[in-house]
Structure formats: C-alpha cells, structure tokens
Image (cartoon, rainbow, N blue to C red):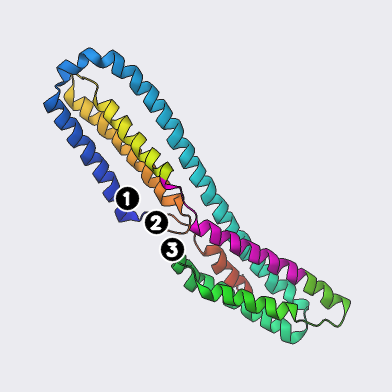
Amino acid sequence: MLNGYDNVVLILACLISSFTFLFLLNRIWIPAKRRAHNDVIGWQISVIGTIYAVMIGFMLYAVWGNFQVADSNADLEASALVNVYRTAEGLPEPQRDAVQQWARMYARDMVTAEWPAMSRGHWSREGHQVIDHLWSVVISTQVNNASQQTSLDHTIFELGDLTLHRRQRRLENDSSLPAILWAVLISGGIITIVAASLIGSENIVLHFVLVLSLALLISLILSAIADIDMPFRGSVHVSSYAFAQAQNTMSGND
C-alpha cells in the first residue's frame, strides 16, 4: 500500500541507488577491464532477466486479479443491498419501513465511515451493527399471506448474499502479499540491476541510460504491485462508488 508520495520516493531511491552503484563500480572496476567478461556476463543477464521478468509479471497479474475480484465483490455487495431494499417492499409495513431505513443507513455508513476506515487499515463497527439490526428485523417478521412470505424469502436470500459479500470484503481488506514474496521481488530487482551494471561498455553515457531505464521500469512495476496489493488502501483502491449509486437508487434518484 503506497500513496503518491511514497511512489515518487521509491522510484527516486531506486534510480539514485542504481546511479550511485554504477558510478562507484566504474571507479573500482573500470569498464575496459570488465569488457573481457562480457561474454559470461551477457548470458547470465539473459537468464536472470528472463526469470525475473516471468516472476514479476506473474506477481503483477496476481495482485491485479485480486484487485478486480475485490472491486467486483464490492459491486455485488451494493447490488445485494439494493435488492434487500426492493424485496422488502412486500413485507408488512412496520418491518418494511425498518428494513428500508437500515438499508439506507448501511449504504451511508459504507461511504462515510467504512471506506475511510478501510483506507487506514481498520474496520468500521457501524456496518456490522446495521447488518445485525437487519437480520433481527427480518427474522422476527410475521407474514400474513403468501405474497408477504415470498417477499420475506427473497429478502432473507438477498440479506444472506449481502452478508456473504461483506465477509469476503473484510477478508480482502486484510490480505496482502506475504513478506517472503516481497523479499524475492526486491532481491530479484537488485540482482537484475547489478548484473546489468557489470557489463563493460565503451559508451559510458549509454550504459548509464540503459541501467537507469531498467531501474525505472523495475521500480515502476514494484510500486504498481504495492499500490494494488491491498485493494482498499493506497493511491489505487476500490472506491465506494457502488454504494453511492445504491444510495441514489434507494433515495429515488436513480
């Protein structure tokens, strides 16, 4: 989880470190002496670069897939909430009004309380309390005819769906890449940049440009992975737009 400032600092630190390493390497082991080893270094860079490219590509694909799943799950949760509101129309009047009131309150709490709390790595209690109230009202509803029974059955089903998606969202909010995988990604990036720096090039400026370009690319990908690793935090996150739309729908503004 990184914000915009963290991303800039990470990229600059990677570029400065790469530049400093190559500058010191050229002072300690001049490029003219390294050229004799270019044949050996060249194929090693190819192997290291291929392995790291596959690894970092897989990690980026995995966290992006998780991000899309979290985004879709939030949309499904908001849709289930709207369905609870609509299916409650057929319930007896006291329970109908209570369910619809709590549904509107749930959407409001998601936008004003829970999403800001998740962006800080916390969890809002208001949403859990609203879910408890919804279940209490629905379970205690006494129906008088078949139409009300049908509405109650659908409301219970949609409320169960809402609870399921909420539980899934909580698990997604707490999940992240294991530390061992971050260690592998960072170590692989360092090894790749070091290997590229070992080449003895006749054109020193071009060599600096290529190494810094490689460092920039690696740092951009690592910052992208860090950004979308935790789908509800950081500069790139799942928004509460679906619940804002749900609010509009339940307020009659859709």
Q: Is residue 252 visible?
A: no
N-terminal of the pair, mark 2 or mark 3, is 3
Kind of element beneath mark 2: loop
- Residue 37 circle label: none
Question: Is the C-beta separation of discs 2 and 1 under 8 Å?
Answer: yes
Which residue lies under the disc numbered 1?
A: 7
Residue 85 screen position, x and y as percent: 68, 73
Whole-angstrom CA distance, mark 2 to mark 3, is 14 Å
Q: What stretch of residues is rendered in magenta?
A: 154-179
Give the residue displayed 56% in from the left and 73% down from the top. Answer: 127
Question: Is the C-beta separation of discs 1 and 3 under 8 Å?
Answer: no
Mark 3, residues whose alpha carbon is within 10 Å: few (<14), some, or many (≥20)? Answer: some
Residue 38 figure quarter: top left
Whole-angstrom CA distance, mark 1 to mark 3, is 19 Å
Which residue lies under the disc numbered 3?
A: 121
Please say if 129 is above or below 209: below
Q: Please, what is the three-letter code of the amino acid marked with disc 1?
A: Asn
Please say if 108 is above or below 163: below
N-terminal of the pair, mark 2 or mark 1, is 1
Which residue lies under the disc numbered 2?
A: 235
Q: Is residue 245 visible?
A: yes
Give the residue displayed 14% in from the left and 31% down from the top. Answer: 24
